[in-house]
């Protein structure tokens, strides 16, 4: 019987790559989305999965998703937003919104779906953090804090649920060419490339490959870890 996976933010650049890879590995994938219903639906049709309305900042969405997906084997907390600007200039409401999605949303989704996993004594959770959660980024302080929180959450939850046969890990991408990074100029991109030891930008498939490994039997003795996918930017 195929495993069931839920990918939050599944219609985005990294999320869609994760959905495609898990489906290729034989999973039935729920493509979680907040507002991109058409994109999620098209992707779900492509991979033989199902689009799932799941705004991770909405408790009612999470509760409804849990009722629809009553036997979840894999949860990938990928949904995220960014805020770029000086820390003291970011409005409180935008900072709270970022935390509600990037950190609290991942925690609340995990809190809900881990109950199903505990009942079956098996399951995998993968949180998508960022290299800025490891090193911090000027002008992305709120984002860095939220992603650092995901790393701490991963380690703590992994310890708590390991006796129940559940593994919790984290993928920490570096600079990945997605729509989120489309605002960079060619000059900016050239400077960023110089800081990447491998000399190339990451692609969504690189993150998807890391997720696929962590939820596979090849990683059955790995939990509470942060797998960096950054071309050597953080060594």
Image (spheres, rainbow, N blue to C red):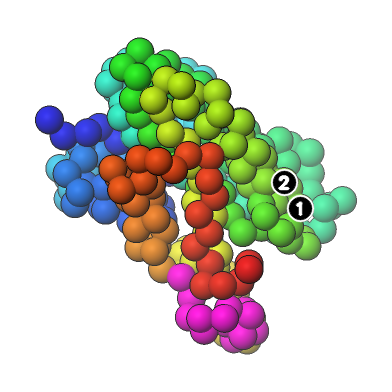
Residue at x-position 39% and y-position 55%: 210
Q: CA distance from mark 2 to mark 1?
A: 6 Å
- The quadrant in which the C terminus is found is bottom right
- Horizontal side of 125 relative to 153 (left or right) equals left
Where 43 sits versus 104, above or below? below
Residue at x-position 34% and y-position 34%: 74
Label 2 with label 1: CB-CB less than 8 Å:
yes
Residue 140 visible in the picture: no
Residue at x-position 79% and y-position 49%: 90
Where 165 sits versus 131, above or below? above
- Looking at the image, which is closer to me, 230 or 30? 230
Q: Position of residue 16 (x, y in %)?
A: 33, 52
- Horizontal side of 41 relative to 114 (left or right) equals left
Q: Position of residue 30 (x, y in %)?
A: 28, 36
Range of magenta residues: 189-202
Query: What count of labels does the image hold?
Result: 2
Q: What residue does disc 1 label?
A: 141
Q: For residue 145, which numbered disc appears in the image? A: 2
Pointer 2 local density, CA inside 10 Å: few below 14, some 14–19, many at least 20: some
């Amino acid at each position: 019987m195929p495993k069931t996976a839920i990918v939050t933010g599944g219609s985005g650049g990294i999320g869609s790559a994760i959905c495609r890879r898990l489906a290729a590995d034989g999973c039935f994938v729920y493509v979680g989305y907040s507002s991109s219903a058409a994109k999620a639906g098209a992707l779900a049709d492509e991979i033989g999965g199902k689009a799932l309305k799941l705004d991770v900042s909405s408790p009612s969405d999470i509760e409804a998703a849990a009722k629809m997906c009553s036997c979840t084997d894999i949860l990938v907390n990928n949904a995220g937003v960014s805020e770029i600007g000086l820390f003291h200039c970011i409005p409180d409401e935008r900072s709270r919104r970022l935390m509600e999605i990037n950190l609290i949303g991942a925690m609340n989704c995990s809190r809900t779906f881990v109950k199903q996993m505990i009942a079956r004594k098996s399951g995998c959770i993968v949180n998508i953090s960022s290299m800025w959660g490891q090193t911090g980024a000027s002008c992305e302080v709120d984002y860095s804090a939220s992603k650092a929180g995901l790393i701490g959450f991963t380690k703590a939850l992994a310890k708590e649920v390991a006796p129940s046969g559940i593994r919790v890990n984290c993928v920490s991408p570096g600079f990945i060419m997605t729509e989120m990074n489309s605002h960079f100029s060619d000059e900016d991109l050239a400077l960023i490339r110089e800081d990447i030891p491998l000399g190339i930008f990451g692609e969504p498939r690189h993150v998807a490959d890391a997720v696929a490994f962590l939820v596979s039997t090849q990683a059955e003795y790995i939990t509470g870890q942060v797998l960096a996918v950054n071309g050597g930017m953080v060594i």
